[in-house]
Image (cartoon, rainbow, N blue to C red):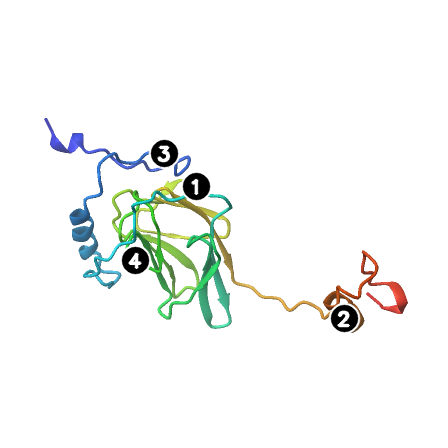
Amino acid sequence: MDETAMIPSLPLKLESCEEVFWEEEVDESIEDSGFTKAQTLMLDLEAEDEIDLSEPPPRDLKPRYVQGILQGTQVYLITNLLHDKSQTLIQSQKVWTIGRNRSAALPLQDRKMSRRHAVILYGADHEFYLLDLNSLNGSYVNGVRVIQRQQLRDGDRVCLGHTEFSFYVSQRERTVDLIHPEVLTRLNNFESRTRSLISYADEGIEE
């Protein structure tokens, strides 16, 4: 019997991250050998420190997201994947690693995720990309498995292991008009406000 026929293949398309991938435990030696062959990234392969997996990850209580921000020459990510609190992640090389390893930019408690699972990077063409680092269970964008790298667009759904999040990208900025000084005073002085509604039109204030 062909031994390769006994190895389960990864699905090329998923309906959701709840779909079961593998029943076997993660073979870290397979991950490390596969990662070593990847020539596109040079990461710390000696780091063995992992996050605590004694407790299963909590169920999502609110939408989870990663947002890529381009502001002038500065590029960074904002995400609430870490402890359900939004954080700004600045990386000078514009490369953010994702995995179970504590040294990752986004260290996540997910047993179906590899220690070095994937990378979000900002390319020379001014676009964000998701790269799968030969992970055991694969990476998916909008339900389709990422073979090499996949450009991330505003509103994409990303699935890594059991972790699912939306990716947003903000590449434009707009300066909003100033508010009239008297209206601004009212907005900043709630205690002295006696009316329940602030009007832009009363007392001759133009909109």
Residue drawn where x is 43% and y is 60% of the image: 127
- How far apart are the alpha carbons under marks 2 and 1? 43 Å
In terms of image quadrants, where is residue 138?
Answer: top left
Mark 4: few, some, or many residues within 10 Å (few <14, many ≥20)? some
* Mark 2, residue position: 185
Disc nearer the start of the sequence (3/1): 3
Residue drawn where x is 72% and y is 71% of the image: 178
User: Do residues under tags 4 and 2 come within 8 Å of each other at their CB atoms?
Assistant: no
Disc nearer the start of the sequence (4/2): 4
Q: Secondary structure at mark 3?
A: loop
The tag on residue 201 is: none
98 relative to 201, above or below: above
Disc nearer the start of the sequence (2/1): 1
Disc nearer the start of the sequence (4/3): 3
* Mark 3, residue position: 19
- How far apart are the alpha carbons under marks 4 and 3? 26 Å
Q: Amino acid at mark 1?
A: Arg
Q: Position of residue 143 (x, y in %)?
A: 40, 40
| Mark closer to the observer (3, 2) | 2
Q: Amino acid at mark 2?
A: Thr
* Mark 4, residue position: 102
- How far apart are the alpha carbons under marks 3 and 2? 54 Å
Mark 1: few, some, or many residues within 10 Å (few <14, many ≥20)? few
146 relative to 105, above or below: above
- How far apart are the alpha carbons under marks 1 and 4? 21 Å
In terms of image quadrants, where is residue 56?
Answer: top left
User: Do residues under tags 3 and 1 come within 8 Å of each other at their CB atoms?
Assistant: no
Assign the C terminus to one quadrant of the image.
bottom right
- How far apart are the alpha carbons under marks 3 and 1? 15 Å
Q: Position of residue 163 (x, y in %)?
A: 39, 45
- How far apart are the alpha carbons under marks 4 and 2? 47 Å
Disc nearer the start of the sequence (1/4): 1
